[in-house]
Image (cartoon, helix red, strand yellow):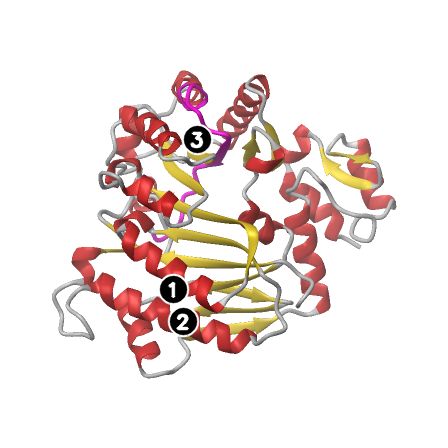
Amino acid sequence: MASTPLGMYIHVPFCSRRCGYCAFNTYTLSEQSGSAQIHSDPIEQYLEGVLSEIALADESLGQNRPALHSIFFGGGTPTLLSAEQLGRILSAIVERFEVERDIEVTVEANPDELAPGQLEQLRHRGATRVSFGMQSVQPNILQLLDRTHDPERSLQAVSEARLAGFDHISLDLIYGTPGETEQDFSLTLEAALSTQIDHLSAYALSIEPSTKLAARVRSGALPTPSSDEAADRYLAAEAALQRAGFNWYEISNWAANPSAQCQHNLLYWRNHNWWGIGPGAHSHLDGHRWWNLDDPKLWAQTLSRGASPISGSERLTAEQRHLEDLMLGIRLAEGLPPHLAPRDHRTERLLNDGLATYQADRLVLTLNGRLLADQVISVLASD
């Protein structure tokens, strides 16, 4: 694995409130407090677990490893931890791992839960990139998604991040929410692009089966999101972002320039290697995948005993790895190399249907192909 880029993901599972659409492994702090465990403070218990798992990763990976290419704090809400606490984690990583000189360190944040001076402290402690969950600027959409910030707060947070010294700032948007109009999304795009961001992610709302939002859709209280409307929103995003000088580099992600692309997420899409730290975190090393125990207390207790927190694992076959390379790589604007997409009857079909094109010798999705990426993958994976 010495020649394959390596990243580290740190999952912070805590939220002050769980959003109704979210199916990630998250817990409110009130759910985790009040029982006699290693600590009464769930964050301190979590921090001890993280430091133990960093040591475990160091021991397990050994010396034949590359310098870390990226570090990503995701969640949950990483900024529920103080800058000092996040800095403790970063320091522990840097003490044990060599890191690239220009390593990307991303922290996800909720706009309305930042402590005064927290962004400046994070930048001082080594964070290079911050990603805010904006989702929408329409109050009714934010309310339906159970977001707690007001529309203006996201815009203020971007300005504060720029003043704090962050060169790379991203906003996340969600489109296709029940009741969202074309104008709603247009105003959200306009507001996002009026800020000093250099990266934007836009995702169609997915109704995850175990969520509160899914229960409302099943009961008929909310309509099922329309795939046709979602496609229209995507086309609107592409047009607005192109006018603003942003280019897509992955189906749901646009950057103002190549340096603004999220290097950590590129690890995922290129099927490179990463070690996941934290409850429910997933890892991948050369076709071997594993995932941690979900429950933060059980995860921390297991580590405190010196045991591995792994809940399950799998080793992919050559065929499975090939399929994953197709599924992930076709999402990228750089496209698929010849060994994954040779010119044959399958790629000819995609060319004839206007879903893909060749740029140099790489197969790249057209705009229509980006809307029908699942269909493209099906064709590429067929006999």
| Relative vertical location of residue 246 with respect to residue 377 in this rendering, above or below | above
Q: Residue at x 69, y 48 (%)?
A: 378
- Left or right: 204, with 83 as reference point: right
Near-viewer residue (41 or 88) = 88
Q: Position of residue 307 (x, y in %)?
A: 38, 82
CB-based contact (under 8 Å), mark 3 and mark 1: no
Task: Give the position of the N terminus as an image quadrant.
Answer: bottom right
Q: What amino acid type should be assigned to the residue bearing mark 3? A: Tyr
Disc 2 crowd, CA 10 A, few/some/many (<14, 14-19, 20+): many
Near-viewer residue (289 or 182) = 289
Magenta range is: 191-210
Q: Which residue is mark 1?
A: 278
CB-based contact (under 8 Å), mark 2 and mark 3: no
Q: What amino acid type should be assigned to the residue bearing mark 2? A: Glu
Disc 1 crowd, CA 10 A, few/some/many (<14, 14-19, 20+): many
Res 108 seen here: yes
Q: Position of residue 316 (x, y in %)?
A: 64, 69
Q: Which residue is mark 3?
A: 175
Q: What amino acid type should be assigned to the residue bearing mark 1? A: Gly
Mark 3 vs mark 1, CA separation in Å: 29 Å
Element type at mark 1 = loop
CB-based contact (under 8 Å), mark 1 and mark 2: yes
Name which of mark 1 and mark 2 comes first in the sequence: 2
Q: Which residue is mark 2?
A: 53
Mark 2 vs mark 3, CA separation in Å: 36 Å
- Left or right: 126, with 257 as reference point: left
Q: Residue at x 38, y 53 (%)?
A: 24
Q: Position of residue 248 (x, y in %)?
A: 61, 32
